Amino acid sequence: MIDLIRHRLRTSPRIFDLVKNIGRTFGNRTPLYACMHKYIPTRASTTFIQIGAADGLIHDPYREFILRPNMQGILVEPLPYQFKRLQRNYAGKRSLIFEPSAICYPSNPIDLFVLDEDFLTGHPNRELLALQTSTSFERFRQSIALCCVSDADEHITRV
């Protein structure tokens, strides 16, 4: 039953936002939330850029502020699996620009290693694994091994 609830929250932005707002009503406020609530204006137009936006839902402390009508900005996410979900999770928000890029210095093309979408879709720990990436194949293998994933070499993709 709990897995079904988690799945619903992760796949339905409206339900996720409703539950989050209920939690805020009952005092579930982090120090980051308090700071942003205090300093981000609710009426004046505000422009932002979010680097590493992930899926725009899970583990995103900025989502409820980005959803405000006065917010406009750019969401940057290099991982294809997360980028698709990011676009889906903000589908109704027209004042956003989505950029499928990695930000690095100096400005050169880089390779990122991730698990492919087929592997992630069927894995019970897909939310955690979808956030894993590295510029080194070996470091990526070590990282996913720490997540108890082995024998996944054929599912590692270079982006």
Image (cartoon, helix red, strand yellow):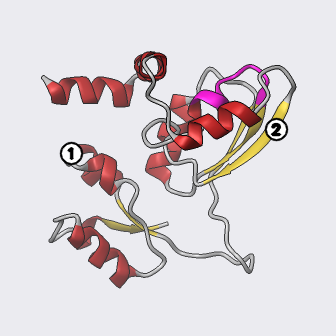
* Amino acid, disc 2: Thr
Q: Residue 143 versus residue 32: which sits nearer the camera?
A: 32
Where in the figure is residue 110, as x and y percent of width and height?
Answer: 59, 76
Q: Is residue 113 left or right of residue 78?
A: left
Where in the figure is residue 150, as x and y percent of width and height?
Answer: 15, 70
Q: Residue 146 versus residue 104: which sits nearer the camera?
A: 146
Above or below 19: residue 39: below
Residue 66 drawn in magenta: yes
Above or below 117: residue 26: above
Q: Which residue is drawn at 44% across and 43% down?
A: 59
Q: Residue at x 65, y 40 (%)?
A: 35
Neighbours of disc 1 within 10 Å: few (<14), some (14-19), many (20+) = few
Q: Is mark 1 on a helix, strand or loop?
A: helix
Above or below 111: residue 84: above
Neighbours of disc 2 within 10 Å: few (<14), some (14-19), many (20+) = few
Q: Residue 38 versus residue 67: which sits nearer the camera?
A: 38
Q: In this view, does 14 lie to the left or right of 4?
A: right
Give the label on residue 122, or none: 1
Q: Mark 2 points at which residue?
A: 47
* Amino acid, disc 1: Gly
Q: Residue 49 versus residue 107: which sits nearer the camera?
A: 49
Q: Give the range drawn in magenta.
A: 64-71
Where in the figure is residue 116, as x and y percent of width and height?
Answer: 34, 57
Q: In this view, does 102 lie to the left or right of 130?
A: right
Q: In this view, does 61 lie to the left or right of 104?
A: left
Q: Which residue is drawn at 36% across and 81% down?
A: 139
Where in the figure is residue 152, as x and y percent of width and height?
Answer: 21, 68
